[in-house]
Image: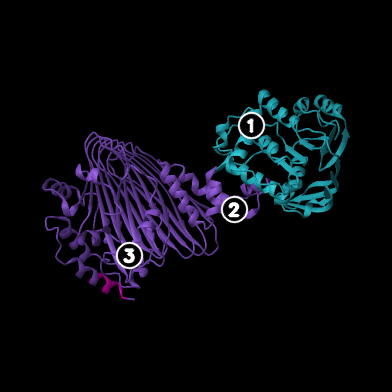
Chain colours: A purple, B cyan
C-alpha cells in the first residue's frame, strides 16, 4: 500500500519519460493538468463514493510487458461479427494476430498514432483533447500524459461504414501488477455514419491489471454514431474509463452499454453539445455482485440550443456490492429549446448492498423541457406471485425477473451478435449459464 | 374436487371472507357473483395462495390435499389455475420464456417429459391461433403493452397450455368488448371436458351468456347468501343485488 501522494508522484515520474510521439501536442497539456491535480479522496465530490485505494494496494505503475496470451481463449471472448473490422489490444498493446482490420487500415480509416501520416497527425492534434477537460478528469490527464500510442478511427465524410468497427481490450493475468493505458480517438467527418463496438474483457482469473482508458469522440455536422459498450471483465481487474463526446450541429450519438462491477470500476461519460440540433441517447445497465464496486458518472453539457438527450440507466445491485449512479444534465443559458430526460431505475436485492443514485438537473435557460428521476426497488411482489401461480418456484421466478429487468436493456442493443454475447456474459454473471441459455434461446 | 368449508380470511386485519362454504365437483361450472367489495376476488386469490390474505379458520380441500398448506407454485402444479383480473406486465421476459418455464415446471411435477423448444413453440402457436392471437405476441414481453383483451386472452392461453383441473377466473370479462369476450369464452368452453372444474368470478351475467354455469352463488358481506341455478343470474341482472341483501 502506498500513499495517494506517493502514487501520484510516481505516476508523474512515469509520464515525464521521453515518448516516441514527439509530434503530439496533448501530452504537455495533460502533464500540466496531472501535475496540478490531486488524486481523488473522499472529500472530492465527484469521487465521494469511490475510494481509489484499490489502486494503491499494488504497484501498478508500470506498463504491462508484452504478454503471450492464450489465443484460443482470447477468441472465445469475441462476438460473432465475421465481417467487422476487429482491433484487439492485450494489456494495452495491439495484438496483430488476434486483430483483423487491414482493409480499414489501408483506407486510412483506422490508424495507430505511431504510424499516422502527416495529415493524420494533424487531424489527431486538431481533435485530441477537444472533448475533454483534463483539469476535471485526473485519470484522463494521466492517460494523455503518458501517450505511447493510440488508435484513431477516422470515418470519411458522407459515407456509411457497412460493417461495425469492433475494438476489444483484453486484460490477462500478469506476472506482476501493471497498468494498461489505452485511448481511442473517433473523428466522424460530416455526414459519416458508423457503428463502434467496444468490449472490455479479460482472460484468466486473478487479474492484476489497472486499465485506464479514454475514448474521445468528435462527431462533425450530421455524423451519426452508434456505440455499443460491453465492460465485462473479470472482477479483480481495476478499470477507470473516460468517455468524452463532442456533438456538433445535427449530429447523432447513441450508446448502449453493459457494465459489470469489479474491484474498482469507474465510468465517466461526458457529452458536450457544441452545435444545434444534435441528439444523444444513452442507454445502459450496470450490475454488481460479491464485493464489487461500480461508479457511473454521467455529465451532459447542453451548451447549444435545440438539442435533445435521452438517458436511461438501470442498476442491478446485490450481495455486498456497491454501485453509484450520478447523472447530471447541465443546461447553459443559451441552450434554449433543449429537451433532456434522464432516469435511473435500480434493483437493490441485498441488505448488505449499497446504491447511491443522484440525478441532477441544472437549468439556466427558460424555454426547455426536462425531466429526471431515480428509483430503487426490490422485485415486484405481484410479478413474483404471477410466476408462482403458474407453477414456477420462487427462486426461478426471482431469477427470471432479474433477467427480465436487465434484458429489457439487452433487447435494445442494435446488433444481434452483440445481444447474444451480452446474454452469454450475463449468463456467466448470474452464475447459471445452462439454465439461462435455455431461457434466452426461446 | 374442491371443498371449501367455513373459510374466514382477513386482509390487513379486516375480515373479508366470513365463513364461505362451497363444493365444486369435476366438470361443474360455478359462478360467483356479488357487488363490489363482497369478497369475490379475495376468494379466488386465497384459493391461489396470494400473500397478504390471512386465513383465520376453515379449510380448503383440493383433490385430497389441504390446499392452504401449499405454496402458490405447489397449488399450480397440483392443478389450480387463477386467471388474473389484472395480469402483470413483465418487460424483458418474453411470453414464450414465461410460458415454457411454466409448462416445464408443471410437466415435471406431473412426471411428464420436458417438451423440447420446437415442440413447445408449435403447441403455443397452435393455441394462439385458437384464441385469435397473433403468434408474434409470444415474442413480446409478458403482457407488455398488451391491450386489455390481449391480456385476458393470454390468461386463457396459459390455462390451455397448463391444463389445470380447477380454473379460477377472476373477472375475466372486465374490460372486454363483446368480440373479445366471445373469443375468451370460446377458449374457456373449449376446456370444458366434463372433468375440469371452473369457478367464475364476475359482476355481470353477460359472461354467463357465453359460459353457461351449473350453479350461481351470490356473495355478500363475505358469505354466500344465495345459491341457485343459471336462472339466478338472470334474476340478479333484472333486480340488482340489493334484492338479496
Residue found at x 63% / y 28%: B129
Asked if badge 2 and badge 1 are on a common chain, one would say no
Query: Is label 2 or label 1 in front?
Result: 1
Q: Are marks 2 and 1 in contact (CB under 8 Å)?
A: no
Over which residues does the magenta segment extend? A2-9
Our reading of the magenta stretch's main secondary structure is helix
Q: Which residue is mark 3?
A: A210
Q: Is residue A410 left or right of residue A276?
A: right
In whole angstroms, how far apart are the C-alphas of marks 3 and 2?
34 Å
Residue B52 appears at what percent x and percent y?
A: 70, 51
Asked if badge 1 and badge 3 are on a common chain, one would say no
Residue A208 appears at what percent x and percent y?
A: 36, 68
Q: Chain of mark 2?
A: A
Q: Are marks 1 and 3 in contact (CB under 8 Å)?
A: no
Q: Are marks 3 and 2 in contact (CB under 8 Å)?
A: no
Tell me the crowding category of disc 1: few under 14, some 14 to 19, or many 20 or more residues within 10 angstroms, Cα based. some
Residue found at x 45% / y 53%: A425
Which mark is on residue A398?
2
Q: Quadrant of the C terminus of chain A?
A: top right
Q: Which residue is mark 1?
A: B126
Which mark is on residue A7?
none
Query: Is label 1 or label 3 in front?
Result: 1
Amino acid at each position: 500500500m502506498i500513499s495517494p501522494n506517493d502514487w501520484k508522484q510516481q505516476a508523474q515520474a512515469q509520464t515525464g519519460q521521453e515518448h516516441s510521439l514527439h509530434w503530439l501536442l496533448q501530452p504537455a497539456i495533460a502533464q500540466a493538468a496531472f501535475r496540478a491535480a490531486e488524486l481523488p479522496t473522499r472529500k472530492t465530490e465527484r469521487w465521494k463514493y469511490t475510494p481509489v485505494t484499490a489502486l494503491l494496494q499494488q504497484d501498478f505503475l508500470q506498463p504491462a510487458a508484452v504478454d503471450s496470451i492464450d489465443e484460443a481463449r482470447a477468441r472465445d471472448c469475441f462476438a460473432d461479427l465475421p465481417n467487422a473490422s476487429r482491433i484487439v489490444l492485450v494489456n494495452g498493446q495491439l495484438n496483430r494476430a488476434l486483430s483483423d482490420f487491414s482493409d480499414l487500415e489501408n483506407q486510412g480509416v483506422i490508424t495507430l498514432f505511431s504510424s499516422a501520416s502527416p495529415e493524420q497527425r494533424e487531424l489527431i492534434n486538431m481533435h485530441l483533447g477537444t472533448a475533454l477537460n483534463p483539469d476535471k478528469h485526473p485519470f484522463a490527464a494521466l492517460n494523455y500524459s503518458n501517450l505511447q500510442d493510440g488508435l484513431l478511427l477516422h470515418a470519411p465524410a458522407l459515407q456509411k461504414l457497412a460493417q461495425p468497427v469492433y475494438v476489444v481490450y483484453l486484460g490477462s493475468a500478469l506476472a506482476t501488477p501493471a497498468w494498461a493505458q489505452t485511448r481511442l480517438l473517433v473523428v466522424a467527418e460530416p455526414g459519416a455514419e458508423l457503428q463502434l463496438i467496444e468490449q472490455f474483457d479479460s482472460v484468466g482469473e486473478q487479474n492484476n491489471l489497472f486499465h485506464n482508458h479514454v475514448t474521445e469522440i468528435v462527431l462533425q455536422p450530421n455524423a451519426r454514431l452508434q456505440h455499443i459498450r460491453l465492460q465485462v471483465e473479470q472482477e479483480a481487474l481495476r478499470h477507470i474509463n473516460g468517455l468524452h463526446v463532442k456533438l456538433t450541429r445535427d449530429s447523432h450519438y447513441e450508446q448502449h452499454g453493459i457494465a459489470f462491477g469489479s474491484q474498482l470500476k469507474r465510468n465517466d461519460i461526458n457529452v458536450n453539445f457544441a452545435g444545434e440540433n444534435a441528439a444523444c441517447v444513452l442507454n445502459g445497465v450496470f450490475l454488481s455482485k460479491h464485493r464489487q464496486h461500480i461508479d457511473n458518472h454521467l455529465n451532459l453539457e447542453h451548451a447549444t440550443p435545440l438539442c435533445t438527450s435521452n438517458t436511461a440507466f438501470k442498476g442491478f445491485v446485490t450481495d455486498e456490492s456497491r454501485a453509484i449512479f450520478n447523472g447530471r444534465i447541465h443546461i447553459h443559458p443559451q441552450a434554449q429549446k433543449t429537451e433532456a430526460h434522464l432516469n435511473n431505475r435500480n434493483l437493490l436485492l441485498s441488505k448488505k448492498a449499497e446504491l447511491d443514485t443522484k440525478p441532477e438537473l441544472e437549468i439556466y435557460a427558460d424555454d426547455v423541457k426536462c425531466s429526471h428521476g431515480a428509483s430503487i426497488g426490490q422485485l415486484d411482489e405481484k410479478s413474483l406471485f404471477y410466476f408462482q401461480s403458474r407453477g414456477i418456484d420462487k427462486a426461478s421466478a426471482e431469477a427470471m425477473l432479474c433477467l427480465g429487468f436487465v434484458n429489457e436493456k439487452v433487447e435494445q442493443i442494435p446488433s444481434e451478435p452483440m445481444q447474444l454475447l451480452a446474454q452469454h456474459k450475463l449468463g456467466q454473471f448470474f452464475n447459471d449459464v445452462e439454465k439461462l441459455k435455455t431461457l434466452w434461446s426461446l | 374436487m374442491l371443498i371449501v368449508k367455513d373459510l374466514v380470511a382477513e386482509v390487513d386485519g379486516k375480515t373479508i371472507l366470513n365463513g364461505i362454504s362451497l363444493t365444486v365437483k369435476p366438470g361443474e361450472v360455478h359462478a360467483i357473483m356479488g357487488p363490489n367489495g363482497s369478497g369475490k376476488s379475495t376468494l379466488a386469490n386465497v384459493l391461489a395462495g396470494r400473500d397478504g390474505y390471512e386465513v383465520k379458520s376453515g379449510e380448503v380441500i383440493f383433490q385430497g390435499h389441504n390446499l392452504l398448506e401449499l405454496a402458490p407454485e405447489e397449488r399450480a402444479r397440483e392443478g389450480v389455475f387463477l386467471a388474473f383480473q389484472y395480469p402483470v406486465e413483465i418487460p424483458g421476459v418474453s411470453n414464450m420464456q414465461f410460458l415454457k418455464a411454466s409448462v416445464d415446471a408443471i410437466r415435471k411435477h406431473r412426471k411428464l417429459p420436458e417438451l423440447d423448444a420446437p415442440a413447445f413453440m408449435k403447441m403455443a402457436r397452435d393455441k394462439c391461433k385458437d384464441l385469435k392471437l397473433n403468434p408474434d405476441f409470444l415474442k413480446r414481453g409478458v403482457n407488455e403493452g398488451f391491450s386489455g383483451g390481449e391480456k385476458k386472452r393470454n390468461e386463457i392461453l396459459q390455462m390451455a397450455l397448463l391444463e389445470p383441473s380447477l380454473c379460477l377466473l377472476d373477472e375475466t370479462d372486465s374490460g372486454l368488448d363483446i368480440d373479445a369476450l366471445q373469443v375468451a369464452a370460446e377458449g374457456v368452453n373449449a376446456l370444458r371436458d366434463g372433468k375440469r372444474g371452473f369457478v367464475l368470478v364476475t359482476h355481470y351475467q353477460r359472461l354467463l351468456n357465453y359460459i353457461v354455469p351449473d350453479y350461481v352463488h351470490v356473495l355478500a358481506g363475505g358469505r354466500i347468501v344465495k345459491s341457485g341455478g343459471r336462472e339466478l343470474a338472470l334474476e340478479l341482472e333484472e333486480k340488482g343485488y340489493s334484492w338479496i341483501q
